[in-house]
Amino acid sequence: EIVLTQSPGTLSLSPGERATLSCRASQSISSNLAWYQQKPGQAPRLLIYGASTRATGIPARFSGSGSGTEFTLTISSLQSEDFAVYFCHQYNNWHTFGLGTKLEIK
Amino acid sequence: EVQLVQSGAEVKKPGESLKISCKGSGYRFTSSWIGWVRQMPGKGLEWMGIIHGGDSDTKYSPSFQGQVTISVDKSISTAYLQWSSLKASDTAIYYCARPRGRDYFDDWGQGTLVTVSS
């Protein structure tokens, strides 16, 4: 089973700042990685797939990069609505999720 | 518009059985897979398994193999997740989600809260 390790566990930033979230896979998953945002009481929402392709309707301030075992989600300038939990998901070998990064207001 | 509508919240006692549902619409159910994802209180997402809406081909996560049963009734475009004997540790929100192909999940149900308590 492929394990995804997300870091940091919690990230405290202010609106307008840049957020960088990491996801490391225990073995190569090519570019078969997605990112989701989840707000309290809501289902996850797809942000990025194929490591770097934004899903429909996702603002350009969200970007993804990486391949193989190292991946990054970047939010260029945080808006108030971006404070949430973010999960990475590999679908190279069936499916696993990371434990999440909580992005909180500093 | 793709919609996945899940059954309502459940409160059960340990040892009881349960079957929750996820009805798909707005797409060809028999050509798509549906996955189930668990989220325990305050925790992350865990993939449980996935089933094909047309031929019922099913794959379980090793962590959930033998613990739950995933099925479909393609005549009513509905997927199911069931337990034969619930435990308190099954308390969680369960999401169904439709992958693009067998890949990333781009459509999600609203979640079903299952509470198991004596």
Image (tube, rainbow, N blue to C red):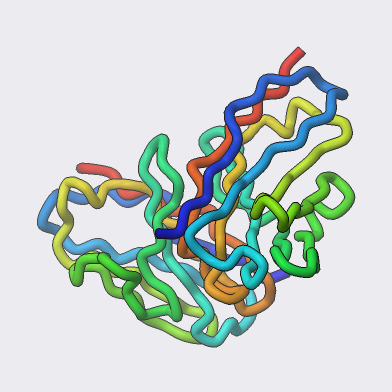
Q: Is residue A50 above or below residue A83?
A: below
What is the quadrant of residue B8 in the picture? top right
Indicate left or right for A45 with A96 as reference: left
Q: Position of residue B106 (x, y in %)?
A: 46, 64
Q: Position of residue B83 (x, y in %)?
A: 82, 37
Q: Nearer the viewer, residue A94 or B17?
A: B17
What residue do we see at 20% from left, 42% from top?
A106
Indicate left or right for A49 with A2 as reference: left
What is the quadrant of residue B72 in the picture? bottom right
Q: Residue furthest left?
A: A16
Q: How many marks?
A: 0
Q: Is residue A38 above or below residue A33?
A: above
What residue do we see at 65% from left, 24% from top?
B10
Q: Nearer the viewer, residue B76 or B34?
A: B76
Q: Position of residue B32 (x, y in %)?
A: 62, 69
What residue do we see at 42% from left, 65% from top?
A35
Image quadrant occupied by the N terminus of chain A: bottom right
Q: Position of residue B88 (x, y in %)?
A: 75, 26
What is the quadrant of residue A95 in the picture? bottom right
Q: Nearer the viewer, residue B62 or B37?
A: B37
Q: Nearer the viewer, residue B75 or B57?
A: B75
What residue do we see at 58% from left, 82% from top?
A29
Q: Residue furthest top?
A: B118
Q: Is residue B102 above or below residue A13?
A: below
